[in-house]
Image: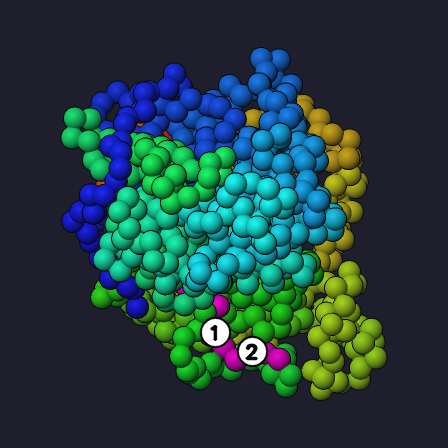
Amino acid sequence: MRASLFTLGSLASTALAAGTTLPPGWFTFQPGEKLKHTQFHGRPRYLTWMADSQMQHGVEPILAYTVSAYYSGILRAYERTGDKKYFDYVKRGADILLYPEHDGTVLMYNNRNSIDDIRIGHTFLDIYNATGDGIYKKAATHMRKQIDRTGLTPDGGFYHRFPAYIDQMWLDGFYMLDVFYARWTHEFESNNITAWDDIALQFDLIDAGTRSSNHTNGLPVHGFDYSKSQVWADLETGAAPRVWSRGVGWYIMALVDTLDYFPERHKGRKRQLKYLRTLADALVVSQDKATKGWWLVMDPGLEHRSGNYIESSGTAMFVASLFKAVRMGYIKGDKYLKVALDGYSLMTTTFAQPRPHDGSLAWEWTVQTGSLSSNGTFEYYASMPLFENDLKGVAPFLFSSYEYELYRTKASGCIPFAEPPVGDLRFRNPRPYDKSWKGSRDTNKYSPACPSQLGYNTSEDCLYLNVIRPSGYSNKKLPVAVWIHGGGYFQGSGVDLRYNLTFLVEQSVKIGHPIIAVSMNYRLGAFGFLNSAEAFKTAFGGDPSKVTIWGQSAGAASVGAQILAYNGRDDKLFRSAILQSGAPISLVSQSDLSEALYKLLLKNTNCNSLECLRSLPFVDLNRALNSTALSGWNPKIDGDFVARHSSQQLQDGAFVKIPIIVGATTDEGTSFSKLGINTTAQFIAAIQNSSPPINISFARTVVKAYPERSHDQVLHNFASDWVPPPTYGKQFRRAATYYGDVNMVAPRTLTAEVWARNRLPVYSYRFDAIPAWATYVQGATHFVDVAFSMINLNGTGYAPIRTPPFSGLPESYRDLARLMSGDFAKFIATGDPNGWKGRTDSMISLGKPIPTWPLYKTTGHGSPQNFLCQGNLSSTVEKDTWRRKSIALLNSVNLDVYDR
C-alpha cells in the first residue's frame, strides 16, 4: 500500500544566515515566455519544472562535480520527456569544457588538482553513449587517467586533494571519483579485477575510518585522517568529530550508484550492500519526526541545538538514494519508502519555492559549503551561509523528482503466473500458480529470463510477470496491454530493458486514456512456448474485459497463435490485439522437424526417454540445447493448442473475432535475406533450399514475380542500379524483398484481408522510419518500430550494443514515437487508435496535420489503405499497393508450398 504524504507548513527559523541569490551565469537557456510547469498525475512535475528553471537561471559550465551532477539531473528530464532541449543543453555545456580543437582534451584541467573535477567524466560518457562520438570517449578517458594519477593514503585510499588534504579521505569524495571509476570499469574494462578490488577497497576504508565511533548510531562522520595529525582528527582513530548531512548524502548516493555497475559475483558487492543497509537504517532513525527532513549536523543529541536546522541538500540526497535503492532492490522494506515519500513532500512544500514573477522554481535552504579544512566543529558547520539555487541541492532534488515519478508509475516485477516448470513439470503444460505467500513479496526487481540460446541471466524458474500501472488509479479497472516479446522462439525475455513499458503507461496518462501494461517471460526453444490461459485471465488488477495482447516478430506470431488457439475458441481472455511484424500465418507447421530435433537431443544427452530429459541437471540440458544443431524449435501442429494449419483456420473463420492493428516495416527482409546472392541461379537455389524445401518450378515463378530490379523493392530510396557491398551480393535487394514478403509482409496482408472480409475492425500500417542504430543497408528493417511504439526516447537497453534509436535524429522522429505510442495506447484503451487529444498536431513541426487511421477494407474507393509512419516526413495514409501481385502469389500457396 502506498504511504501517505505528509506536509509541513514551515521550518524552524534557526538558520544563522539568510540565503543569497547566485547571479545568472553566462551559459543560459532563455525560454521565450513565463515558465509553466507540467503535471504528473495531477501534481506538478517538479523534475522538468526545476530543470527548466535552472536552465533559465543560468549555470556556468565548469569541471566541478556539482555541475556534472546537475547535468545528470537534466538528462533525467530528457529521459522522462524525450525533449531534446535537455540533451542539447548538456551537450553544449560539455562542448564548452573541451578545447576548441575538439580532440577530446579537457579545457583548464589541472592534473594536480583535487578529485572534485573527475566526475565530469560521467557527463562525457553520457554524451558518448547517446551520440557515439569518440571525442567524448577521449574526454572521459582523460578523466579516467587522472584516477591513476590521484595520490593514495598509505593503506591505498584516494586522498582528497594534493597537497592540502594528503592522507585524508572524505565522504564527499566518493561521489566525485568512485562512481565514475566504477562506471568506466563496467563499460570498458568489466573483467579488470584489479580495478574492482580497488573500488571495493575504497568503500572498506571509508567505512572503517568514519564509523568507528559509537556515539553516531551508525552514521558516518565526515571523514578521517590516516596520519591523525589534523586538528579535528581523533587521536586514536583519526576520525572527524561530526556527522555532516551533505557529506553523508554524497556518500550514500555514491554507494547506490556504484552498485549499479559493481559485478554481482565480486565479494566486495556484499560488503557494499551491508554498508548501504546499515546507513539506510540509520537514516530512518535520524529523520526528524516533525519536519520529515534531516538536520545539518546529525549527531545524536545535537538535533535541536541552537544553530542547527533542517538542511535541504542532505535531505534531497537521502530521499533520492532511498527511492532508488528500493527501486533497484538494494534495500527492502516499506519503512524506507515511507521515509522517502515524507522527505519528498517536505521538499516540494518547503524547499522548492515557486517564483510568481516568472513562474520558475527556486531551491532554498542549502548550505554553501562544509569542509574539513576547518576545525570540523559544530560551530563551523553551523556558521556556513545558505545559498539559493545551489547545485548541491538542485541536482539531488532533480534525482529525487525523477525517482518519485518512477515510483508514481508503479512497477511490480517477479510476479508468478504459473508453477516453476522444473523437475517433473519440465516440458509439461504450465500448471496454474494457485499458492499464496505469507508477508510481503519483493516485486522491485526482475526475474531471471527463461533459458535461451543467448547468454542472459536465465533460470528454468522464469514464468513471471512485470506489471506497470499508473499511480492514482488504484480504484479504477483500467484497460490492460499484455506485451509478448519476440526473439524467434529461442531468445528474448520480458525483462529486456528495451521493452520498458513505463514510458507507454506514462504516455497513456498524458493522452487521457490510462492503461496498465504487463510484460512476461515464456519458455523458449525446446523448453516450450507461451500458453495464454494462466498469463491472461486475471487482468492484473485491470478490467478483464479490456485486455489487449500485443507483440512483435515471434511475439506477434505468438499473439496470432492465441487468436487461433484451440481452433479459434473464444475464451474471452482478450478483446483486441496488436501485431508488429508478425501474424497468425507466421506459424511453421512441420512436426517432422521437431521429431528429428528431439531424437538428436536424446542422442546428445545420452538419454533414451522424455523422463530422462526431465531428470537431467539444467546445466547439462542447457549446454546440449545451445548446440547450433539443436536450434529451430518452433510451435508445431499438436491438434490441440495449434489445431491445424493457420492458413486453413483463417480461410474457415476459425479464429477469435476481435479488432486488431497489424503492420510491417518497409525493409523487413534486410534482416532475413540470405547473403552473397549475385545471380538469378543463386537466387533460385536459395529459394529451393528453404524450410520447407520448394520445388524448382515454383522457385522460377517466384523469380519472375521478384525481378532483379524494380521500383518497389526494399531500400527503394536507392537508385535502381545501386550495388550493395560485396558481402551482401549484387542481388541483395531482390532477395531481401522476397524474404521480407514471405516472412512478414505477405502474412500481414493476408491477415488484414481476412479481417476485412469478415467485417472486423482492422488497422494496417507500414513503418518507414530508420532509427540511429540501423545501417544504410538495413534501412527500415525488422524491429525498427519497437522503440517508437514503446516511446523509448532515451534508448534504454540499446547501448552499448546498439546506438540509441533517436541519437542524432531530428525532433520529428521523437514526435513520431509520441504519435505511434499514443495511437497504440488509445487502441488498447478503446479499440480505436484515433481521436486522442493533441493527436492531429503531434507532428506539426513538419507542417501537416496527422490524418486518422483508416479501417482496412478490400472494397470501396481508395481501398485498401495503410497508415504510413514516417519520421522525416509527416505520417500519412497510403494505398496498400506495394507488390500486390507478388504478395498475392505467395498467399495463394501458403498451404501447398509453405506448409502453413
Quadrant hosting residue 215: bottom left
In percent of the image, x 71 and y 29: which residue is there?
724
Q: Residue at x 62, y 29 (%)?
A: 163
- Give the class, few, some or many, for how many residues have Cα within 10 Å of label 2's Cα (few <14, many ≥20): some
Q: Position of residue 328 (x, y in %)?
A: 48, 58
User: Would you call the spot at circle 1 few (<14 residues within 10 Å), some (14-19), or many (20 or more)?
Assistant: many
The image position of residue 245, as x and y in percent, is: 40, 47
Q: Secondary structure at mark 2?
A: loop
Task: Please give the name of the residue rendered at 32% of the width and 24% of the height, measured from the top-left corner.
Answer: 22
Q: Is residue 112 above or below residue 184?
A: above
Circle on res. 420: 2
Q: Amino acid at mark 2?
A: Pro
* Magenta highlight range: 408-422
Q: Secondary structure at mark 1?
A: strand
Provide the residue designation for mark 1.
Answer: 416
- Which of these two is toward me, 769 or 173? 173
* Camera-nearest residue between 469 and 822: 469
* Alpha carbon separation for disc pair 1 and 2: 8 Å
Q: Quadrant of the N terminus?
A: bottom left
Does the rendering let one see residue 63? Answer: yes
Three-letter amino acid code at the position of disc 1: Pro
